[in-house]
């Protein structure tokens, strides 16, 4: 009984610590965005509630926050959709088709993804400049697809190999082509995994900074992480209230996606391909 009590206490203490560790920065960000004095904690002043910071980011034209947010949503959605489409085809081939060197292909893709962004950005910028794509959506979407594809491929391969091959054989017996099997059997069965992978690809693209900084020049294609980082240059000082308000507002799409798809994600982690 005493051992069970100690285990329960340690579990509760660990969970509480992790919860506070993860949520304290977010809580500080929200409080700062709602205060007229961003230094209220360090100066021990009273918390002065205001929505002025949110009004500023939504109405002040020079901040271009709405443009940055729109760009991020377009680029992240497009890159996630194309990434999942390509990764699904590749994962099905690796998981189902007989082909030599499948393991080397997977590890090769993983090895290529380990190159740091800073080592690629100069060549990537020259390529985009030669194509005339600098400060366009294409300049971000294509690198984001290449950047998120290795992780997406590995996740989807792990999902596809867990789907019983008997489903493929049943489809072939019924006269389905490989494309029909993938579209009508494999993809619906692996839907939780596909949705969770798409969500991860979207989040990675939404939060990416280096490519967006180097391949965009203004609000026509610049995404929200770079836009928020450049708030300082617009005002001559660090507008912490506006930065925190923009950061809080820009997390809403990610939170909404996680809340909407959390059930599907959990199903993808706990369910098998065939229900008993």
Image (tube, rainbow, N blue to C red):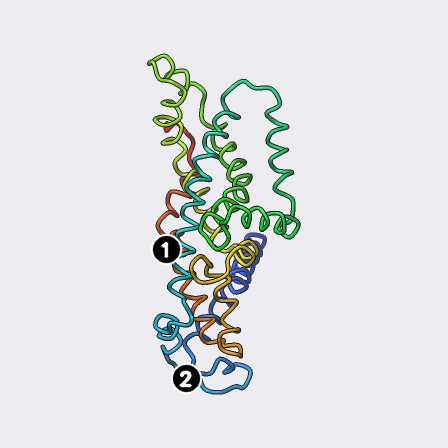
Instruction: Give coordinates of residue 165: x percent, y percent.
Output: 45, 20
Q: Nearer the viewer, residue 273 or 52?
A: 52
Answer with left or right where residue 9 lies relative to residue 172: right
Name which of mark 1 and mark 2 comes first in the sequence: 2
Q: Callout 1 environment at 10 Å: few (<14), some (14 to 19), or many (20+)?
A: few
Report the residue marked by disc 2. 48
Q: Nearer the viewer, residue 153 or 124?
A: 124
Quarter of the view holding residue 103: top right
Q: Callout 2 environment at 10 Å: few (<14), some (14 to 19), or many (20+)?
A: few
Report the residue marked by disc 1. 256
Answer with left or right where residue 116 lies relative to residue 36: right
Residue 140 bears which disc, if any?
A: none
* Residue 266 showing in the rendered view: no
Q: Nearer the viewer, residue 39 or 17?
A: 39
Residue at 53% in and 73% down? 233
Indicate whether 25 appears above or below 52.
above
Please identify the quadrant where the C terminus is shown. top left
Residue at 61% in and 42% down? 113
Quarter of the view holding residue 21: bottom right
Residue at 64% in and 49% down? 116
Answer with left or right where residue 97 lies relative to residue 68: right
Instruction: Give coordinates of residue 86: x percent, y percent.
Output: 46, 34
* Residue 177 showing in the rendered view: yes
């Amino acid at each position: 009984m005493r051992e069970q009590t100690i285990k329960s206490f340690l579990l509760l203490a660990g969970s509480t610590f992790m919860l506070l560790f993860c949520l304290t920065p977010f809580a500080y960000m929200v409080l700062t965005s709602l205060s007229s004095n961003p230094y209220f904690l360090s100066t021990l002043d009273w918390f002065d509630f205001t929505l002025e910071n949110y009004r500023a980011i939504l109405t002040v034209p020079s901040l271009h926050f709405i443009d940055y947010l729109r760009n991020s949503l377009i680029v992240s959605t497009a890159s996630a959709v194309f990434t999942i489409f390509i990764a699904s085809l590749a994962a099905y081939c690796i998981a189902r088709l007989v082909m030599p060197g499948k393991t080397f292909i997977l590890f090769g893709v993983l090895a290529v993804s380990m190159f740091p962004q800073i080592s690629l950005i100069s060549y990537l910028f020259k390529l985009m400049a030669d194509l005339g794509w600098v400060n366009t959506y294409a300049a971000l979407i294509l690198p984001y697809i290449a950047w998120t594809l290795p992780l997406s491929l590995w996740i989807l391969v792990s999902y596809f190999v867990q789907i019983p091959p008997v489903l493929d054989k049943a489809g072939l017996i019924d006269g389905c082509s490989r494309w029909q099997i993938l579209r009508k059997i494999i993809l619906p069965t692996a839907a939780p995994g596909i949705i969770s992978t798409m969500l991860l690809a979207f989040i990675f693209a939404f939060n990416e900074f280096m490519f967006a900084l180097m391949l965009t020049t203004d609000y026509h294609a610049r995404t929200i992480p770079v836009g928020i980082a450049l708030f300082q240059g617009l005002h001559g000082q660090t507008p912490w209230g506006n930065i925190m308000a923009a950061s809080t507002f820009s997390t809403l799409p990610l939170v909404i996606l996680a809340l909407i798809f959390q059930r599907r994600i959990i199903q993808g982690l706990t369910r098998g391909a065939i229900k008993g």
